[in-house]
Amino acid sequence: MNVYRLRHILGQVGAYTGAVAVMIFALFPVYWILSTALKPNSEIFTREPSLIPRELTLEHFQRVLSGVLIPETTFWSFLGNSLIVTLGSVAVAALFAMLAAMAVARFKFKLRTAFILLLLLIQMVPVEALIITLFVNFHSVGQALDISLLGNLSSVIIVYTTVALPITILMMRSFVAAVPPELEEAAAIDGASRWTIFWRVMMPLVAPGLVAASIFAFITAWNEFLVAYTFLQNSSGSYTLPVSLRFYFGRVTTEWGAIMAASTLLTVPVMLFFLFVQRRLVAGLTLGAVKG
Amino acid sequence: MRKGRVTGDRAPAADPRDRASGGRAKPAPGGRGLARRRRLTPYALLAPSFTLLVVVLVWPIVHMVWMSLHRYSLPEVTGAREPEWNNFQHYLFILTDERFWTIFRNTVLVCLLMVFITMVLGTLVGLLMNRLPNWLQATVGTTLMLAWATPIISAAIVHRWMFDSRYGLVNPVLDALPNWLVGSNWSDFNWLNDPVPFFSVLILTVVWQAFPFVAVTVLAGLKSVPNELYEAARVDGASRWQTFWRVTVPILRPLFALLIVLQVIWDFRIFTQLFILAGGFSNREIFLLPYYAYQLGFASTPQNYGMGSAISVVMTVLVLGITAYYIRIMVRQGEVR
């Protein structure tokens, strides 16, 4: 019996140690971003980096926020652009996905299975492979309409919305299907129009699911780099935050302090947001394909 | 009516079953016009999503194939010159292009290594979490997911910084460690120049962000294994090792299959991390397929959109092939109804 107790205790100690090690491994790079951002240059450009900053400074944040690093821009315009593309694409994707989910979960129609298969297939198409064609297409359409789509946030919003659609529809489908049809029938008997039923019965019931499904779209859009960089690189006025980070790398010297400060300003909001919504996320996380 | 064959080996990590609710109540009496409107309703609801998907994702695939079969550079884009059919020249070039095959080999190798390490590490961490008390499980899970939610570009930048040859953290740490363990002379070692060290850093960057998802999913799977099975195994005198291989793995097999397929697809597409770590397009030794296509399209003079498209077509075919397998798993599990 005692041997077993000892083994159990040793096992627990091992598990706790492992847990701490895993947490350190997962958090260290994030910590390194933060601590570098807060170090003075003398502690950054040294052959003997210290794990814990000996001296804290906010100078790098000041430099980033005052926007002296990329000419003719300000940090606030990057932040504004990021918010516009993120909120814009999530809002449109949520609305479109909700309508599509209603169709798939509530109706029988000929092309239903075909549409679901299309979603499953299309959600895996690598944007990295389509980027050349998307660039060329947006260029041509912009030329035909005599508007500049590239270099304009609208093109980025269109792509983000579309990329977010498949997973959002697939997730919403199960949330809509979980609502008992009897509720809608009862409302219909009471003489409510379809539109009223949709907004007054369906929406309140699936709202939590819609939020959960939107979180992925939100995080993906906030973090996305390649599409935004390819479309916007020639117009610094419409850089999103991730794109702006690329331009802190100098030709000769690299201001690591400033880059880490800017990375902090990109990373911390999404982490706080994540901590805030993570309970809802766990339900959605186990749905399979999530990261775009 | 849909027929979701719910088999016993469904992944535990599936969405809540939706109930078989084909359509709504009986159509309201109201003549043919109404009935027809009912028939068209689902299509009307799908129209906005469908339009976007076709215009932004399906049509570009078709267009990409078309572009890969023509001479296509900047003049063709601006309309100054008509694209010229070139008899599969791009593809013939790829077939005999040594650089392409080297990059292709590296892509497959790096991708497989990433997936393997991610799966092993993720599974081990999932098993570890399963042995922790609930409060600690939640804490570890949250911490892990923070790594997952980190913007890819931030992750790439901080790894580039840690492996910086002059001021990075890694070289001094390696120098401080005993020589019998890690060798010596690490100061000024350049990690981001030669393929092997470069890909090692890239793999670390990607795995660091990818393993949390596997760990959390595996944990969810482990929790779904009925305790009776473990009881029975214990009564039968099975060792822990045997229990893991004979009970846990068979039950979680579909889940593992799904995770592996997803990881392969995601890791095959790696671009941003490579872009930041490489810092540009000058070093061709460290290209991967998507990066090569991008460089041909955007960062070469003249821009070779046609050749870039041809490589993108190869990539898309591979990814969609793997995806078809993934969908087969989903269909088997009754996900597609």
Image (cartoon, rainbow, N blue to C red):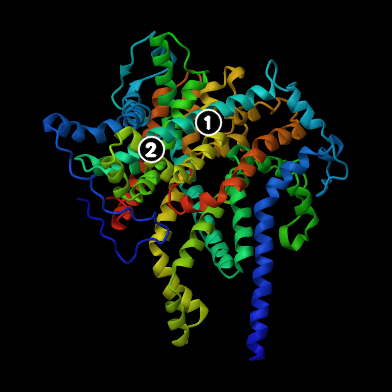
Image x and y of residue A54, in percent: 88, 45
Q: Which mark is residue A98?
A: 2
For the point 22% across and 55% down, the residue is B3
Image x and y of residue A111, in percent: 22, 39
Do discs 1 and 2 belong to a common subunit?
Answer: yes
Q: Distance between the residues labelled 1 and 2?
A: 16 Å
SS for dot 2: helix
**Does A154 sit above or below residue A162?**
above
Image x and y of residue B164, in percent: 72, 41
Q: In this view, does B129 lie to the left or right of B244?
A: right
Q: Which residue lies furthest to the left in this view?
A: B32
Q: In this view, does B142 lie to the left or right of A167?
A: right
Q: Are marks 1 and 2 in contact (CB under 8 Å)?
A: no
Q: Which residue lies furthest to the bottom in this view?
A: A1
Question: How many neighbours does mark 1 have within 10 angstroms: few (below 14), some (14-19), or many (20 or more)?
Answer: some
Q: Which mark is residue A260?
A: none
For the point 64% across and 22% down, the residue is A77
